Amino acid sequence: MPSRVLARIATTGIYLLRGVPRDLQRAARVRAGREGTTLRWVLLQALREYAAGTWTPQADEKSPEAAHNQRR
């Protein structure tokens, strides 16, 4: 299934996140809505935690990013 670009226009700029599968976007939006929040807030919170060093994503050996990082 082709992925679409998830674009968010904010007062501080435009943010593009490419390669996000449509089913992942949809599932995340549904969960955020069910929990009374927004996908924007979820993404900002993840970025805050990552920047603060309180959360580190686990590498997925199947992801393109993991393959790219292994070649470096």
Image: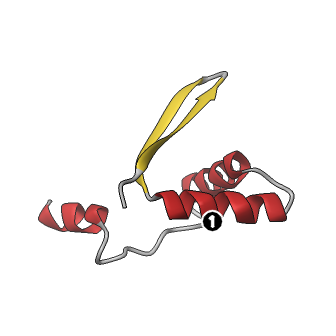
- Location of the C terminus (image quadrant): bottom left
Identify which residue is drawn at 61% across, 59% down: 26
Three-letter code for the amino acid on which mark 1 is drawn: Ala
In front of the other: 67 or 25:
25
Q: Position of residue 50 (x, y in %)?
A: 56, 58
- Location of the N terminus (image quadrant): bottom left
Identify which residue is drawn at 18% across, 68% down: 70
Relative to 39, does residue 15 appear above or below in the rendering? above
Q: How many marks?
A: 1
In front of the other: 58 or 40:
40
Under circle 1, the secondary element is helix
In front of the other: 58 or 41:
41
Q: Which residue is mark 1?
A: 27
- Colouring method of the image: secondary structure
Q: Position of residue 68 (x, y in %)?
A: 20, 61
Q: Position of residue 52 (x, y in %)?
A: 60, 55
Q: Position of residue 3 (x, y in %)?
A: 40, 53
Identify which residue is drawn at 29% across, 61% down: 65
Apparent side of residue 45 relative to residue 51 in the rendered image (left or right): right
Relative to 18, does residue 13 appear above or below in the rendering? above
Relative to 48, does residue 58 appear above or below in the rendering? below
